[in-house]
Image: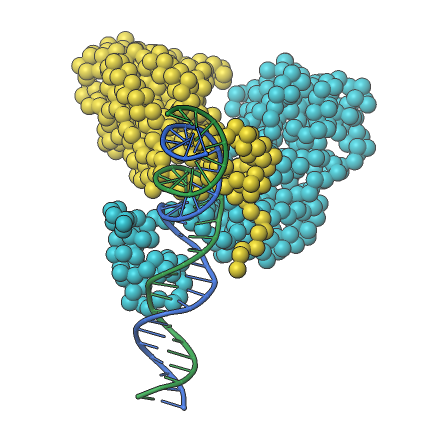
Chain colours: A yellow, B cyan, C green, D blue
Amino acid sequence: MPKKEEQLSGVKEIAMRANVSIGTVDRVLHNRNGVSPKTREKVKAIIKELDYQPNLLARRLASKKVIHIATLIPLVSKDTSYWSLPLQGIMRAEEEIKRYNIEVDKYFFDQDDKDSFVSQTRKTLRKKPDGVLLSPDFIEESVAFTNKCNQLGIPYVFIDSDIEAQNRLSYIGPDLYDSGYLVANLVSYVLRGREAVLVLNISQRTYKHHHLLKKEEGFRNYFKDNAIRKKIEKIDIRKGDNLSIEKEITSVLSRNKDIRLVFVTNSRVFIVAKCLKKLKKKLILIGFDFIEENIKALTEGDIDFLICQKPGEQAYKGIMSLYQHIVLNRQVDRMQFMPIDIITKENYQFYKN
Amino acid sequence: MPKKEEQLSGVKEIAMRANVSIGTVDRVLHNRNGVSPKTREKVKAIIKELDYQPNLLARRLASKKVIHIATLIPLVSKDTSYWSLPLQGIMRAEEEIKRYNIEVDKYFFDQDDKDSFVSQTRKTLRKKPDGVLLSPDFIEESVAFTNKCNQLGIPYVFIDSDIEAQNRLSYIGPDLYDSGYLVANLVSYVLRGREAVLVLNISQRTYKHHHLLKKEEGFRNYFKDNAIRKKIEKIDIRKGDNLSIEKEITSVLSRNKDIRLVFVTNSRVFIVAKCLKKLKKKLILIGFDFIEENIKALTEGDIDFLICQKPGEQAYKGIMSLYQHIVLNRQVDRMQFMPIDIITKENYQFYKN
DNA sequence: ATTTATTTCGTGTACGTACACGAAATATTT
DNA sequence: AAATATTTCGTGTACGTACACGAAATAAAT
């Protein structure tokens, strides 16, 4: 018996109303050719009239197109294992969505080599991905790259650091200012009276320096906002080797006997921990990021607090946001700040990245 | 020609390896009966071995089951149109997902009638929904209800206010404490010297009072945290009628000539605006929520600031989170705080709920 | 040993869309 | 007008899963 022709839906209904086959409707929907202008218009009209919304689940299922998401993050470098965490997050997301015909193409650049970044962006673009996740370390170059993405209609999300001006789908990562602010709050509890703070910005990479400055700004503004007078000594160290760092620290500490706490504005805090240990200086040490080297120093009592922002989650969410947006057409929050976690010797075991 | 038997996937692959049909695999997957213990075990083993993950898109497409999401929110009441906004959000989400065989069943209760809440929870449970969105206005009753949901394995999300202890999928809404804190910050810019603040908690409903108190707590703690001395006069008004409110306000204002700013801890601020207008008192007025009555007062200059947290978005996100979780098995953030927006006469036109 | 009841399983169709293939209709050339 | 080229369109199969139906195999009853 012929099926009762109740409520058709989707392409079929359009096809029926337009007296054409679903094949034709399909061609109109995808702007493929092979349909006469007049039926095309007719079908388009009906599509509009019905306010047709495709069933995205069915679409993805039927499509043989593989969706490509490109990721562009730093190589895991010798001086910190930080970027292995986002990478794990990326792979976790990949595992979850690859069965929906989504492929994740991973590109890596050398944090110390601007050219490698540029060449990787080129590679990325050549593959015409459907979406990009990137850590926009080199600002100008990232802007150039994402401008091209804008032109090509490729959505992209930033992780780890942000370039607000760009037309990104989302930024997922820390609120740098806030995390500095939080540290200041911590500091205000820990220090008393005239005890001073040393802020250490360690970065060989000039382009990343503004990150550190944002944290420092948050840090300083806490004291300003709360009208707390606090001596803040500060050094920028542009050389990564232990020796230079040690020298600088020794010097500043001998000049400022009142320093009781050191705040390192990035993950290089473990290097400072080593120095202080060597110098036999027991100061309170605060830094960033849940990486192996830091955890080790934490457990050994050489670091007191680590501020973390789930780098794995950041990358995972980044991929998933792209997936949601590309495949399911979902709107995505333009900002997705990660919680600011405080890790100590007592709770680090329970921290899940 | 027979298809090349390359990489089968999903049920088909399992079926092949187990030497059974996909029908049998399907029965095992869904714990339906009609399969002998021994083949069941065999199939189960292979499923585990392959770490089979079903294609959720295909599953939803093929399933004829309609997924039911129940919503349980207050009726739009006479004294504030607030709840029409979340309702709009719910309907927007519904529109978006109904084509995936998801139905949203809306239940409403009277904010002044505990019994109506209870009876609506009963109704909800009778329908055995697959997920619930609710505003847990009556705490004890909400706990009882969600405990039953826990037993039945029904996920639920809270909007507007939270009961942290419960095992909810997510809370989506304002951080009450923070919004009070923010207002205090605003106040500290606006007021000078010895100018005082009046905090007004207007609620006929005792059970909602703790919300207001949380905001007040945040408000007060700002001054404490920042060591600012500020005279804070405060009244709780338990009667909703304009007359009682007017009387109370008149009284407190005549006793405290130094009050220059009034902070109303909920959406009833427009009532206060009317009173002040009638009394010809020009004070700075701050309150909550982007509802029609308030906007009117804002444009007329009778309210100075409105604090809003996109109630429509809250509900929309709530439904979508449930959908994601139920259909796509996505993990969901346990907390989804909404941004705290400050609305003035100048920017209200651009505010999208 | 039949017949009948019951369990166990395979097949077919459907979900809504994509896309390849080829048939029908139309246009162009001879 | 016939032959050919081109455009326009319909049909069929696939995606991975759900589920109804009925066939085959087994068990129970006569």
The answer to whether residue A113 is visible is: yes
Which residue is drawn at the image coordinates 73% and 23% (left, top)? B297
The answer to whether residue A329 is visible is: no
Which residue is drawn at the image coordinates 78% and 25% (left, top)? B274
Which residue is drawn at the image coordinates 81% and 22% (left, top)? B279
Quadrant assignment, res A72: top left
A250 vs B199, left or right, is left
What x and y, as percent, mark residue A322? 40, 31
Counting labels gives: 0
Quadrant assignment, res B163: top right
What x and y, as percent, mark residue D7? 45, 29
Which one is in front, A47 or A120?
A: A47
Q: Quadrant of the C terminus of chain A?
A: top left
B298 vs A189, left or right, is right
What x and y, as percent, mark residue B144? 57, 53
Which one is in front, A131 or C5?
A: C5
Quadrant assignment, res A338: top left
